[in-house]
Amino acid sequence: MDFDLPILGILFGAGIVAGFIDSIAGGGGIISVPALLAVGIPPHQALATNKLQSSCGSLTAAMNYTRRGLMAPRELLTGIGSALLGAVFGAVAVQFFSADFLENLIIVLLLVLFVYTIFSPQLGVKPRPNRLSPPLFYIVFGFFLGFYDGFFGPGTGSFWTIVLVLLLGLDLKQATAQTKLFNVTSNLVALTVFICSGLVLWSAGIAMGVGQIMGAWCGSTLVSRKDVYFIRIFFLGVVGATIIKLVVSRFF
């Protein structure tokens, strides 16, 4: 598909907004995927192209968080490997199966996550003892969330953040930083599969990707300077918006 300059400009702007949101609380797909669909891109190509632009933002945010000392990638290799493997299976599976059942399930899970976070005001404020050993956690959740990100995607960052807080005892700032590293892993793997399948629309993906880089850098810099209460409010807003978006697209 060919896109004229105004359309590419719209996608670039959407990429900035999506990158900013995603680097802080995940959920940038609530902006980027509808934007790609709105310019007439078919669903499977929209999902594939979304992985190109989101990879740019996730990589930028992960690099900035690492530079600012909020995470150490070498300590997370088990999780990276599991997310990589899960994303391969997910990206292959989405080309053969409908995402309808998964979409209904995710709406319910996000709603539970949203309500739980609202009624747990101290969640993620300070680090706590972990409830699961890190190697087991990264193997299990790395594969599961990597698969989900490759197969469907919306809400992946939110799920990563909440399980890192609940099960590994990280505060919201640390969890947000780690989430971006796992996001970029599953995004790049899924993107590779989609490229091999010929589904990526490069001009649209690159236009949004440049915007993602700018938005992600601004968002990740802001997180490093703010306290966890700011991240909590932003997180709740993004999860709530994701739920509304999924419900509207699913039932209306």
Image (spheres, rainbow, N blue to C red):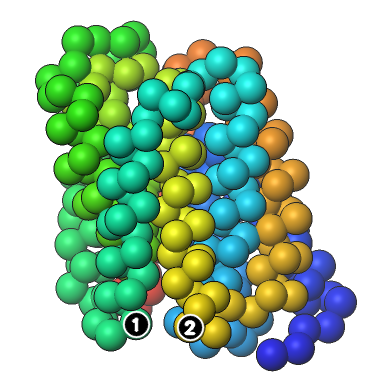
Q: Write down the quadrant of residue 164 in the picture.
A: top left
Dot 1 lies on which element?
loop
Residue behind mark 1: 95
Q: Residue furthest bottom?
A: 1
| 138 is higher (above) or lower (below) than 124 | below
Relative vertical location of residue 91 with respect to residue 110 in this rendering, above or below: below
The residue at the point 31 percent across, 38 percent down is 79
Q: Give coordinates of residue 177: x percent, y percent.
A: 48, 29
Above or below, 33 relative to 225: below
Give the quarter of the figure containing the N terminus: bottom right
At label 2, which amino acid type do we have? Answer: Ser
Residue type at tag 1: Gln
In the displayed orientation, state which residue is furthest to the right.
5
Q: Is residue 10 left or right of residue 236?
A: right
User: Is residue 242 something one can see in this rendering?
Assistant: no
CA separation in Å, label 1 and label 2: 9 Å
Secondary structure beneath label 2: loop
- Write the residue at 42% across / 37% down: 179
Which residue matches tag 2? 197
4 or 72, which is in the foreground?
A: 72
Is mark 1 in CB contact (under 8 Å) with mark 2? yes
Earlier along the polypeptide chain: callout 1 or callout 2?
Answer: 1
Horizontal side of residue 206 vs 145, given as left or right: right
Question: Quick one: quadrant of the C terminus?
Answer: bottom left
**Residue 101 appears at what percent x and percent y?**
18, 73
